[in-house]
Amino acid sequence: MKKVCGKILGGLLIAILILQFNVIVYADEITNLQNEQASNEEKMQDAQDQKEQVSQAKSEALQQVEQIETQIADYESQISELDTKIEDLNNQILDAENQINQKQEDYDKQQELLEKRLVATYESGETSILDVLLSSKGLVDLISNYYMISQIAEADMNLMENIQNEQKEIEEAKTTLEQSKQELDSSKSEKESMSVQLQSAREEKNTYVAQLSSEEQELQQQIDELEEANRSIDSQILAAEARIAAAQAAEEANRNNGSGNSGSGNSSSGGGSTGTASGSADLGNVSSSGFIMPVPASYARITTGMYYSTGQYHGAVDFGTGGINGQPVFAVADGTVIIAQALTTSYGNYVLIRHNNGLYTLYAHGQSGSIRVSEGDRVVQGQQIMNVGSTGNSSGPHLHFEVRTSSSYSSRVNPRNYLPAN
């Protein structure tokens, strides 16, 4: 019996020892797993922190690029203003030089005339005014001689006064000319300094652009190309507006002359005109600003706003919903076509319209060959001007739509503030 009890007790002791060993092993394994888990969590946190740092670095780089782009635009604007100022000063200097030459010519003539009068007076000897009056043969002759002498004396006085005025005006013109030349030199120096700052800003921008991801760099390249093209487009717009203004002035003159010739500014009827949007279910509502949607109501969903998803400035809205390719693009309000052009880059096929309320709208990336209006055409609200496409810098079919407060690229404002709610 004792042997049996001893065996049972020994077995229990062995089982307890084994259990304790297993508990220790399991406890160690759990601890190891917990430690591994903690290590993994720490690594995950490190990775997350690194990811956030990378994301933040990208955001800061993009932010720096955008800030520098603002500086560049400001420098370019100031340089453009200085170019205008320099041109005006050159014109002023040219005018001043012409005035000085003309005044000098007048002065020389007056001086020559005075010298002739002095010679004539000298050659007449000692003849005095009294001698002339006393030689009169009668009252009438006396009055006539007195009047003649008065006229000669007045002419001499006027001649002397004119010479003095000419001298004074020449001196004043020379002073103004000198001031204009000094201001011109100052403006040229300021432009050179601004150009150096512009170059420095561009180099700094390139440094930050190099830090962007490939996707961001591709987007940035598109934006740079667009802005570069727009600097050229701005000057084209100004030239087009001048041509249109001249054509409209000629048209107005023709109407006033009763010729009945309406000129080149007739309303375009180039197929696809749909009249006004009033009562058209397809075109949708009219906003408080008097604008309709530039695409049919069923496609009037904005897919990109004033900023891209990266935070980069877009300055427009895009209509790019599925199936929009080939859909008509409408003038959002009555106006005059300032530009209707096909580019291989930048906006691609695009139209710029100046509206009667002073605003401008721009429609870009139209299908090749789809533009239905020309520079100077008058369009009505809802008139088709082209079709949605993907020309120029475009990643797919969509309408790039801008609203501007003036014709320049820098005056872009949020189109949502002028379009009907959608």
Image: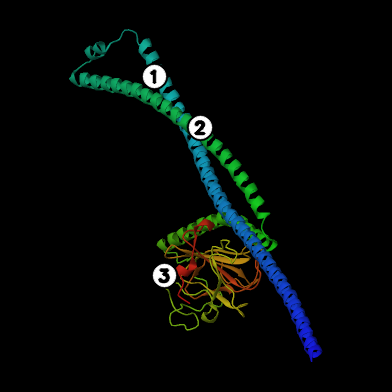
Query: Is residue 378 in view?
Result: yes
- Dots 3 and 2: beta carbons under 8 Å? no
Residue of label 3:
289
Residue of label 1:
114
Using residue 40 as the reference point, say whether residue 143 is left or right of it: left
Please name the residue shown 60% across and 47% down the image: 201
Image spot of residue 57 (x, y percent): 62, 57
Image spot of residue 145 (x, y percent): 25, 19
Using residue 409 as the reference point, say whether residue 154 is left or right of it: left
As helix, strand or loop, the secondary structure at mark 1 comes to helix
Residue of label 2:
181
Using residue 27 as the reference point, say whether residue 124 is left or right of it: left
Give the Cα separation between the discs numbered 1 and 3.
70 Å
Which amino acid is tagged 3?
Ser
Residue 97: image tag:
none
Point out the frontmost of discs 2 and 1.
2
Q: Which callout, 3 or 2, points at the residue further toward the start of the chain? A: 2
- Dots 1 and 3: beta carbons under 8 Å? no
